[in-house]
Image: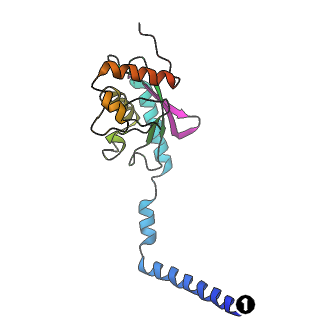
Amino acid sequence: MSQNAGGTDAIAAQQQTNNTAAIAAHAPNAKASRAVSQPVDSHSVSRRLQSELMSLMTCGDPGISAFPDGDNIFSWVGTIKGSKSTVYEGMSYKLTLKFPTDYPFKPPLVKFDTACFHPNVDQYGNICLDILQDKWSSAYDVRTILLSIQSLLGEPNNDSPLNSYAAALWNNQEEYRKANCKHFRDAGGVMAISK
């Protein structure tokens, strides 16, 4: 019986070798295709992100900011303040931005850290925004992302809600404002006092 088991192991090893050789023979461009799908040079991505950081720091756009989280240039913490004359006025939200190694050819993963009651934000902080998905362009930058999310707060896309309750309330702005303030306070948010 042990001889048979050894023979079976030898046959299995030979089949594995044959399968590997067959795959290699039928995929002569395997190395070339791997090279094409490899990420962009991380040094060039780091330079791009450092450049975006400097631009963001000097742009002076009200209500948005973002900085690397510690020494990791691929992980940022952002802040968005609700725009005036919206139900989000006086509220400040923290976000995380995780940049892939092939940024800017792929969008960053952006999520709300502060709980956000919004038609296009789910309970986990995921954001439904076209420029973070299928409408992404390598011409976009962190500033564009933050301004788009800030704009989305006051102008949701109710045709594509992640939070159907918030979407249903949106047309009644007084009720929406009450639910939004309650959700924000319950989540530990602190409202800024308007002057």
Which color scheme did the rendering employ for the protein?
rainbow
- 102 or 2: which is nearer to us? 2
Q: Look at mark 1 in the image and give the residue it sits on.
A: 2
Q: Is residue 60 visible?
A: no
Give the answer, above or below, for where 147 lies relative to 44: above
| Number of numbered discs visible in the structure rendering | 1
The kind of residue tagged 1 is Ser
What SS does tag 1 mark? helix
- 158 or 51: which is nearer to us? 158
Q: Position of residue 110 (x, y in %)?
A: 44, 39
Give the answer, above or below, for where 174 lies relative to 159: above
Q: Position of residue 112 (x, y in %)?
A: 46, 33
Q: Residue furthest top?
A: 195
Residue depicted at 43% across the width and 20% down the height: 181
Write down the region rendered in magenta.
61-80
Residue 65, magenta (yes or no): yes
Secondary structure mostly seen in magenta is strand
- 37 or 51: which is nearer to us? 37
Left or right, residue 10 beside residue 86? right
10 Å crowding of disc 1: few (<14), some (14-19), many (20+): few
Q: Position of residue 175 (x, y in %)?
A: 34, 20
Give the answer, above or below, for where 63 lies relative to 102: above
Left or right, residue 9 beside residue 87? right
Q: Quadrant of the N terminus?
A: bottom right
Residue depicted at 32% across the width and 47% down the height: 134
